[in-house]
Image (spheres, grey):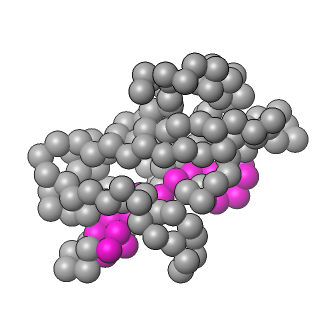
Amino acid sequence: MKQQLTLRIRLESPTVGVDFGLQNGSGHNYDILQKQKSAAQDLCFECTVVAKLGADNQPDFTGPLVQGPPANRFVYINIGKSAGQFDSIWSRRLKVPLRGITAEIVYQTTANSAMLLETNVPGTGKDGGPTCGTVKPFNGWHIAMK
């Protein structure tokens, strides 16, 4: 059975003056959704993915925002030039893993239309620029209210 699951990604204290957006599609054939320029506050991105049970009874995620192989799915946040901000000095992408979302969490979240899954990720890296690569450490997803 397929379930639509709403995700909220909160990018904490992102590098100021940089565009961030969700990557919709893959390879060279993608567009940017919910593009936002960072200021002095966190940025939030909400999106919907489709969860279906895989052969191992664990959720597998699909949809135009979902990237990667079944055992290692993620959502990209594109940054700077990758998000269409061509005057930026940054051209990065941030992988937000979908790991740790169990079938039980999917069931609990989709059973109540007022709930979603949320994660908080750092928006600025050790170099002072936007965080990029796979989020580390990744604190996982938790159920939250819409």
Q: Furthest-left residue in view?
A: 40
Decide whether residue 49 is among the magenta residues: no
Q: Furthest-right residue in view?
A: 55
Q: Residue 17 lies in what quarter of the image?
A: bottom left
Residue at 50% over, 31% down: 117
Q: Position of residue 140 (x, y in %)?
A: 50, 34
Q: Position of residue 10 (x, y in %)?
A: 34, 40
Numbered circles on residues, count: 0
121 displayed left or right of 106:
left
Residue at 37% over, 37% down: 120
Decide whether residue 79 is among the magenta residues: yes
Q: Residue 67 lies in what quarter of the image?
A: bottom right
Image: magenta residue range = 67-84
62 displayed left or right of 41:
right
Q: Residue 91 lies in what quarter of the image?
A: bottom left
Q: Eyeballing the image, is 81 above or below 34?
A: below
Residue at 43% over, 22% down: 145
Q: Position of residue 109 (x, y in %)?
A: 59, 24
Residue at 68% over, 23% down: 107
- Figure quadrant of the C terminus: top left
Residue 34 visible: yes
Q: Furthest-front residue in view?
A: 113
Residue 72 visible: no
Q: Nearer the viewer, residue 42 or 114?
A: 114
Q: Eyeballing the image, is 94 above or below 98?
A: below
- Figure quadrant of the N terminus: top right
